[in-house]
Image: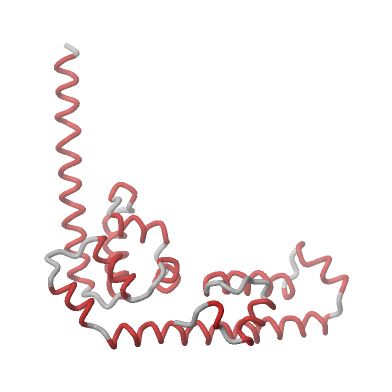
Amino acid sequence: MTSVDNRPEEIQEALTLLELPPEATINEVRQAYRFLRDLYGGESIATLPISSEMSEAEREEILDKIEDAYGKLNRFFEAERHKVAAQSEQAPSNTDQLLSETAEITGSVLKTVRKMRGYGIEEVAVETRIPVQHLKRIEEELFKGLPPPVYTRGFVSGYAAFLAIDPFRAAKDFMNRLQRWKKQESGRSPSRRFRLSFWNK
């Protein structure tokens, strides 16, 4: 994967045009693109000062430059993503061995595979459209903060599929762990309440 310092000059120029730092991510690029496109191409209150300061032709020229820069950056990041995927495919034994030796797909396993494949959690969130906070809770198995089971199952399945892990196995294993946690939690609370009520008599 190309380091920030080694990014081509035209990519650095495109980032500058979108008012982004050299280390910007694809997610930041998309946000900046939407903001600038709306700023120079919209008719909102925020754009009124711009509308009075420049002609329609000047705005169109800026919008063309924004579109061109965004196109270059999109292609660059897509190529980078393919490089990472290719590197993962060249050495599949690492993840394959890990998964073959793993009795159960846990949040920790998903996190490990993600890192082995070279993905940042924000990048996974963008590609899968799963909120970052839910990905983090899945990886850390913070079951209490997860959404209802039907959504959690879908998120785990989608996350696993993105990492080229069997989504059915991953979802089944993770939901089993979730159920075991729920049983433990439900087993603790009543007994604790019983003890408290007994000693308060």
Q: Residue furthest front?
A: 5
Q: Quadrant of residue 186?
A: top left
Residue at 19 percent of width and 71 percent of height:
168
Residue at 18 percent of width and 28 percent of height:
192
Vertical placement of 198 versus 123: above or below? above
Q: Quadrant of residue 185?
A: top left
Which part of the image, by quadrant, shows the N terminus? Answer: bottom left
Q: Residue furthest top?
A: 201
> As rendered, which of 113 and 47 lies closer to the eye?
113
Vertical placement of 183 versus 127: above or below? above
> As rendered, which of 11 and 139 lies closer to the eye?
11
Percent across and percent down for residue 81 are 43, 82
Residue 142 left/right relative to 32: left
Vertical placement of 96 versus 196: above or below? below
Residue at 42 percent of width and 61 percent of height:
132
Percent across and percent down for residue 128 are 39, 71
Percent across and percent down for residue 175 are 20, 58
Residue at 20 percent of width and 46 percent of height:
182
Q: Count of labels shown?
A: 0
Which part of the image, by quadrant, shows the C terminus? Answer: top left
Percent across and percent down for residue 106 are 21, 61
The scheme the figure's colours follow is secondary structure
